[in-house]
Image (tube, rainbow, N blue to C red):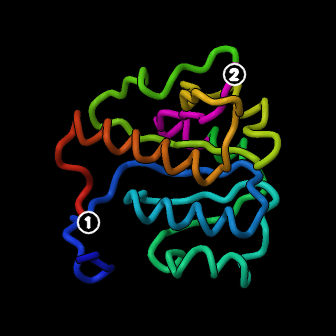
């Protein structure tokens, strides 16, 4: 029998991860980021840059997860990330670059706070933000394409981050 929202056996957990979107502008993608943040127990979401209005397309995709995820909008994503860096967050960008490492090679230290950055649907994370990232990771892909939808990539990234955190810190933040 398929389980639903009320009958599943998942344990609620919160992880010390702030998800930051850098100029993600499509309402459906923003809604999808909320759903991914909720699914993976992310503590906070920052919508950076020029974001779409949180209207009908957004709410259709978010499926009310904006009610359970704390979030803020900021015009200046770079300043917000610098602020997180000054608060000792490990700034991790998800982007394919000449110095990115495969996600599988990412090493996290115990009890580290993470700011996980995803970028614009077409152009990715801005160069100024990539410059201040502590680590840049990419998803290993084996087909012809070198990119995927921002929400799909974000979900894979959050899965891997929470998996790594569970391995080094079996008890994440209390609910």
Number of residues whose C-alpha sits closer than 10 Å to that of mark 2, classed few (under 14), some (14–19) or many (20 or more):
few
Q: Where on the picture, by quarter, is residue 52?
A: bottom right
Picture coordinates of residue 166, whole percent (x, y): 25, 42
Residue 59 position (above or below residue 82): below
| 65 left or right, relative to 7 | right
| SS assignment at label 1 | loop
Picture coordinates of residue 76, whole percent (x, y): 77, 50
Identity of the residue drawn at 60% across and 50% down: 20
Please report whichever mark, 1 or 2, sits nearer to the chain's N-terminal start.
1
Picture coordinates of residue 49, whole percent (x, y): 78, 55
Q: Are marks 1 and 2 in contact (CB under 8 Å)?
A: no
Find residue 12 and name its label: 1
**To which residue does mark 2 refer?**
97
Q: Is residue 84 magenta?
A: yes
Identity of the residue drawn at 45% across and 40% down: 114
Instruction: Decide which of 97, 129 is in the foreground and name it.
Output: 97
| 142 left or right, relative to 89 | right
Which region is colored magenta? 83-97
């Amino acid at each position: 029998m398929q389980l639903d929202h009320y009958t599943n056996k998942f344990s609620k957990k919160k992880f010390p991860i702030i998800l930051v979107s850098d100029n993600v502008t499509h309402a459906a993608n923003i809604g999808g980021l909320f759903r991914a943040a909720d699914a993976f127990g992310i503590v906070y979401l920052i919508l950076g840059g020029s974001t779409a209005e949180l209207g009908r397309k957004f709410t259709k995709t978010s499926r009310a997860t904006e009610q359970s995820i704390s979030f803020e909008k900021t015009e200046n994503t770079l300043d917000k990330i610098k602020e997180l860096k000054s608060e000792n967050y490990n700034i991790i960008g998800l982007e394919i670059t000449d110095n990115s490492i495969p996600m599988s090679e990412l090493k996290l230290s115990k009890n580290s706070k993470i700011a996980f950055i995803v970028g614009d649907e077409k152009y990715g994370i801005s160069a100024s933000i990539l410059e201040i990232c502590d680590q840049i990771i990419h998803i290993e892909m084996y087909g012809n394409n070198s990119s995927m939808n921002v929400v799909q990539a974000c979900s894979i990234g959050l899965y891997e981050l929470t998996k790594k955190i569970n391995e080094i810190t079996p008890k994440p933040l209390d609910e």
